[in-house]
Image (tube, rainbow, N blue to C red):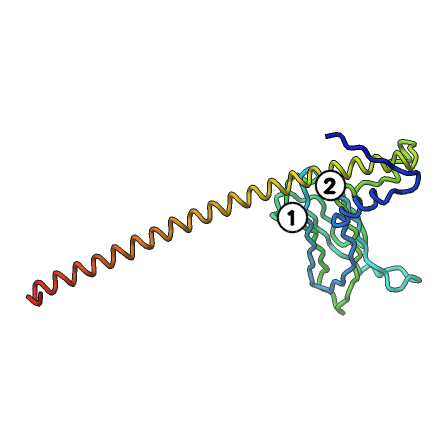
């Protein structure tokens, strides 16, 4: 399918609207972490999607450096643990980047070792996936392209991401439908088996009662 986009010299509202649809692929958050505590953040990432992240401990006193004891350990990988993309121990800041090897949830865990006295650290995390993970300013500098061409490149990436996301969601929907059908089929067979067992038990009880009454010559 060929689609034509008409762009003005200024950023087009249509470009901003589509790019806004992908705001979910950016997680920028700040959270507190106490000594001996672990916190994890998950992100649903498609296979072969680019992911970048930056994290750092916020210094509450900008006029003094952070104490050496104020460090955090980080681990980033797939939720099942089959793929580990980044590990750092006792750091004050860092970054990670990887291309996902599988579909599904990926997790970034942060923890602080036990310290006395107990400290509370504030962690700043910026996690980007898909189109948002690409540094478009760098692309423009390296390719020597102007703003219009850069917008076209971003639109092309967004359109490609929309198509891939649609295919991915459709595949997930088909898998869910198959799973539901399998579950419903199993429940149906279980109900039929339960009905057969109940009827068999009821028949055996009637036969036993009939035999008992005949022996007693009640009937």
Mark 1, residue position: 105
Relative to 106, residue 164 above or below: above
Q: Residue furthest top?
A: 2
98 horizontally vs 217: left or right: right
Mark 2, residue position: 98
Badge nearest the viewer, 1 or 2: 1
Work out which quarter of the rendered image holds the N terminus and state it. top right
Residue 120 % position (x, y): 77, 65
Query: How many C-alpha atoms fall within 10 Å of the one at disc 1: few (<14), some, or many (≥20)?
Result: some
43 horizontally vs 155: left or right: left
The residue at the point 85 percent across, 45 percent down is 13
**What secondary structure is marked by label 2?**
strand
Cα–Cα gap, marks 1 and 2:
14 Å
**What secondary structure is marked by label 1?**
strand
Relative to 31, residue 21 above or below: above
Query: How many C-alpha atoms fall within 10 Å of the one at disc 2: few (<14), some, or many (≥20)?
Result: some
Residue 12 % position (x, y): 87, 42
Residue 122 % position (x, y): 79, 61
Work out which quarter of the rendered image holds the C terminus and state it. bottom left
148 horizontally vs 172: left or right: right
Residue 201 % position (x, y): 25, 58
The residue at the point 68 percent across, 50 percent down is 107
Report which quarter residue 146 is drawn in.
Answer: top right
Q: Residue furthest left?
A: 217
Report which quarter residue 160 is drawn in.
Answer: top right
Q: Earlier in the sequence, mark 1 or mark 2?
A: 2
The residue at the point 79 percent across, 51 percent down is 126
């Amino acid at each position: 399918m060929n689609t034509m986009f008409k762009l003005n010299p200024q950023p087009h509202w249509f470009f901003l609207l589509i790019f806004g649809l992908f705001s979910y692929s950016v997680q920028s958050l700040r959270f507190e972490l106490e000594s001996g505590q672990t916190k994890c953040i998950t992100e649903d990432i498609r296979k072969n999607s680019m992911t970048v992240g930056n994290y750092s401990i916020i210094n509450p006193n900008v006029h003094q450096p952070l104490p050496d004891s104020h460090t955090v350990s980080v681990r980033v990988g797939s939720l099942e643990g089959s793929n580990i993309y980044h590990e750092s121990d006792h750091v004050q800041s860092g970054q990670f980047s990887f291309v996902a090897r599988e579909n599904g949830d990926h997790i970034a865990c942060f923890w602080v070792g036990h310290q006395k006295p107990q400290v509370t650290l504030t962690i700043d995390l910026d996690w980007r996936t898909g189109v948002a993970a690409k540094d478009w300013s760098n692309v423009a500098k390296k390719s020597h392209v102007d703003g219009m061409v850069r917008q076209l490149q971003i639109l092309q990436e967004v359109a490609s991401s929309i198509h891939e996301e649609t295919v991915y969601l459709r595949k997930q929907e088909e898998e869910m439908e198959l799973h539901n059908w399998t579950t419903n089929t199993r429940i149906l067979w279980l109900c039929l088996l339960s009905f057969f067992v109940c009827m068999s038990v009821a028949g055996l009880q009637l036969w036993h009662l009939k035999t008992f009454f005949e022996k007693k010559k009640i009937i």
